Image (tube, grey):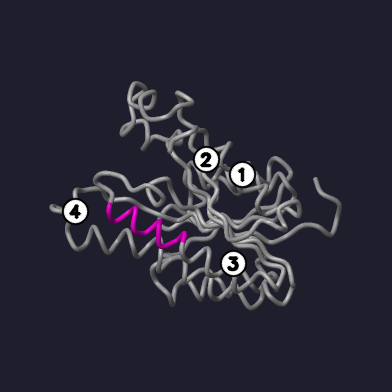
Amino acid sequence: MPQQGTRKLALVTGGSGALGSAICRALAGAGHEVWVHAHHNLPQAAAIAQAIRAAGGLAHAVAFDVTDADATETALEGILANGPVQILVNNAGIHDDAPLLGMTRQQWRSVIDVSLHGFFHVTQPLLMPMMRTRWGRIVNMASAAGVTGNRGQANYAAAKAGLIGATRSLAIEMASRGITVNAVAPGVIESPMSEASFPAERIRQLVPAGRAGTPDEVAAMVAYLVSDAAAYVTGQTLSINGGMV
């Protein structure tokens, strides 16, 4: 654990999923106090928080809909009552794939809503308290699809590309305040969802490394970006994709 006095309050949206829970564990392992966010699945977030506490860390569970500005503001007020959030990982996101020709309005809007409106609803209220501390780390979870595009994912690619643009702009705005803002763009990462979409042979065709990445590998990159060692890294999109172009 870090020396006493280095602990920061961290919020990980979408923290109850496979990738989010790995990020929560990595941040708790670095000595930070973690809020594990979920939307519907508060029991899963609570189980992750309990596992972190059982391992000697500090963690709490919270549930709210990032697309609901008022509900998000209320939830964040409760978190901020414990002190400023100095580490924010915007990991909440969904995908609802279809070729654009057959995509419904709801498919387009729902994916954009979670990634982009959710980013604004969560990040904006936390900025002023973070700025007052003169230290902050914001990491936005983008995707390889937001960098290169992907067939059947125009909505998801647009949402993640927009998040990358927001990352660059916010990094410029916050750089003089001791706050870094970066994006992480994972490729194929092990999860129940990716196993259904990417069989082993397909992964070998797509990924030069010949395998899917692990949530822990992505979490390690996030842990670096929120550390003091990454104080001069901001406005960047870091790909973790096994060599995919």
Residue shown at the point (51%, 58%) measured from the top left: 90
Quadrant of the rendering where the C terminus is positioned: top left
| Residue type beneath disc 4 | Leu
The span picked out in magenta is: 154-164
Q: Depth check: 108 or 29 in front?
A: 108
Q: Nearer the viewer, mark 1 or mark 3?
A: 3
N-terminal of the two: label 1 or label 2? 1
- Quick check: can you spot residue 88? no
N-terminal of the two: label 4 or label 2? 4
| Residue type beneath disc 1 | Met
Are the residues tagged 4 and 2 within 8 Å (C-beta)? no
According to the picture, the residue beneath numbered tag 2 turns out to be 240
The secondary element bearing badge 4 is classed as helix
N-terminal of the two: label 4 or label 3? 4
Residue found at the very far front of the displayed protein: 245
The secondary element bearing badge 3 is classed as helix
Image vertical order of residue 31 relative to residue 76, above or below: above
Are the residues tagged 1 and 2 within 8 Å (C-beta)? yes
Q: Which mark is residue 100?
A: 4
- Residue 5 is situated, as x and y percent measured from the top left of the image, at 84, 59
According to the picture, the residue beneath numbered tag 3 turns out to be 171
N-terminal of the two: label 3 or label 2? 3
- Residue 20 is situated, as x and y percent measured from the top left of the image, at 52, 47
According to the picture, the residue beneath numbered tag 1 turns out to be 221
Are the residues tagged 4 and 1 within 8 Å (C-beta)? no
N-terminal of the two: label 4 or label 1? 4
Q: Marks 4/2: CA distance? A: 27 Å
Classify 10 Å Cα crowding around label 4: few (below 14), some (14-19), many (20 and above). Answer: some
